[in-house]
Amino acid sequence: MKTLMIGDIVGKGGRKTLKIVLPEIIKNENIDFVIAQGENSAGGFGLTQKTSKEFFDSGVDVITSGNHIWDKPDIFDELDKINSKILRPNNYPTNKPGTGIYFNNNLAVINLLGSVWMGKIDSPFDSINSVLDELTNVPIFIDFHAEATSEKAAMAWYLDGKISALVGTHTHVATSDNKILPSGTAFVSDLGMVGAKNSILGMDKDASISRFFNGKRNRMTPVEKGEMIFNSVLIETDTITKKAVSIIRIDKEIII
Ligand SMILES: [Fe+2]
Ligand SMILES: [Fe+2]
């Protein structure tokens, strides 16, 4: 089975890039399932019904998210639907809308949030321990939305052989450490993003610079035009063993 996992899609420019690039990759690479990180799709902060529909129309099967999922309440009802294809990190308290697990007969997708520099959150390690036993005989793909590379690597090594793949998201910076761990779990520290190349994490660079330069909290807006990057990885899993066979980066650049 071939699964594509796409990094944080930022704003209108990111969505437009997704719409142009994704259908071509699905066709050329014979992709069976697409998982995309959507927490920055609505103006850079959060996800809405409109932006999630655009994802699904572009060929995405399941949307994961992260710390920005609570920015736009418009999506909360969607998160609460039975077997929703839009996930929030599973280790938020259970009284929050939604769930961090999607599953069907062929696979499971789990979304977790890191505990380093991400605000107060339940342990992602405890959270994954409580769900893995219930998911048997399907390949499991985890989006671990986290800041610290060490925490992402620790989770991947902890789960090696128990899941098919763990990918990191959140930093918006693609890493080239994609590999298969000894017991068959594919891993990459960060998928990267779908957003503007000449930006800071997909956002207007001047607003970001001034935050660091003089502490002024100028409004951050996504860059919507020009050179755009599309970062993803393609993971192939064995149908019988559910282990990863390969993990390769698929990165594109286009101008919109
Ligand atoms: Fe993000
Ligand atoms: Fe994030």
Image (cartoon, helix red, strand yellow):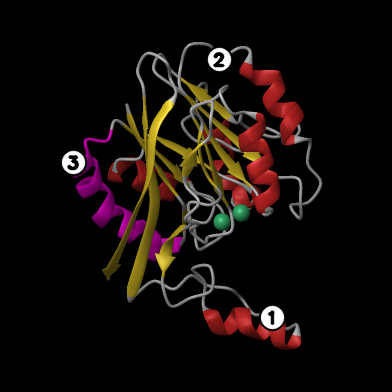
Quadrant containing the N terminus in the rendered view: top left
Q: Is residue 82 left or right of residue 152?
A: left
- Residue lying farthest bottom? 214
Earlier-in-chain disc, 1 versus 2: 2
Q: Amino acid at mark 2?
A: Leu
- Look at the numbered disc 3 and give the secondary structure of its residue: helix
Pointers 3 and 1 in contact (C-beta within 8 Å): no
Residue bearing the label numbered 1: 211
Task: Please give the range of residues in magenta.
Answer: 11-31
Q: Earlier in the sequence, mark 3 or mark 1?
A: 3
Q: What residue did someone put label 3 on?
A: 27
- Seen at 78% across and 35% down, the residue is 123
Q: Quadrant of ligand 1?
A: bottom right
Rendering coords of residue 91 (x, y %)? 71, 34
| Mark 2 within 8 Å of ligand 2, using the beta carbon | no
> x%, y% of residue 149?
65, 52
Q: Which mark is residue 135?
A: 2
- In the rendered structure, does residue 14 fall within the stretch colored magenta? yes
Q: Locate the C terminus and report the quarter of the image it occupies.
A: bottom left
The answer for how far apart the CA atoms under marks 3 and 1 are is 42 Å
